[in-house]
Image (tube, rainbow, N blue to C red):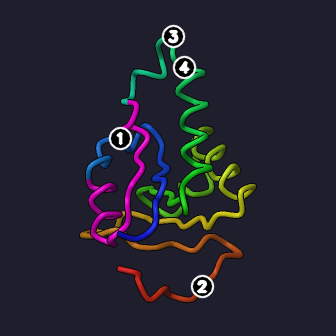
Amino acid sequence: MGKIIFTAYGKEFIYESYSISKFVLDKENIPINPFLNFGYNLGEYKYGSLVREANNELVRRCDELWVFSKISEEFENLADGVQREVSIAQDEKKEVRYFKRGLFRWEEYFPKGGNQNERKDNM
């Protein structure tokens, strides 16, 4: 297996949890998927701060962070939690990659100022 990948995406995209994990596995990497690790509602109960702390620690321990969304414009308006995860990954000098949902597959997206060269392992 390859790298350990933290998958970052907002709650409005929770229905893609399994497809995101499958995508990472198909790339021969190991997915860490916060909604599958802790569930959506666990953070809403008395465990909120503990779940956030555990989630942030997982970001620190992963090799890379991959952000998932439906369309490229959403990368400019990421959920607060996803923004925090990206910030932690950047502080830890981890690679952050962005993916948008294409018609039939995930496609890598390069935000403004990002690397415009296609990756060898890209879809």
Name which of mark 3 and mark 1 comes first in the sequence: 1
> Where in the figure is residue 36, as x and y percent of width and height?
34, 39
> Are the two marked residues, 3 and 4, in contact with CB atoms closer than 8 angstroms?
yes
The amino acid type found where label 2 is placed reads Gln
Q: Disc 2 or disc 4, which is closer to the eye?
A: 4
Residue beneath the point at 40% across and 31% down? 38
Q: CA distance from mark 3 to mark 2?
A: 43 Å
> Are the two marked residues, 3 and 1, in contact with CB atoms closer than 8 angstroms?
no
Q: CA distance from mark 2 to mark 4?
A: 38 Å
The amino acid type found where label 3 is placed reads Lys
Q: Is residue 109 magenta?
A: no
The amino acid type found where label 4 is placed reads Gly
The numbered mark at residue 14 is 1
Q: Which residue was labeled with disc 2?
A: 116
Q: Disc 3 or disc 2, which is closer to the eye?
A: 3
Q: Which residue was labeled with disc 3?
A: 46
Q: Residues within 10 Å of mark 1 (few under 14, many from 20)?
A: some
Residue stretch rendered in magenta on the structure: 19-38
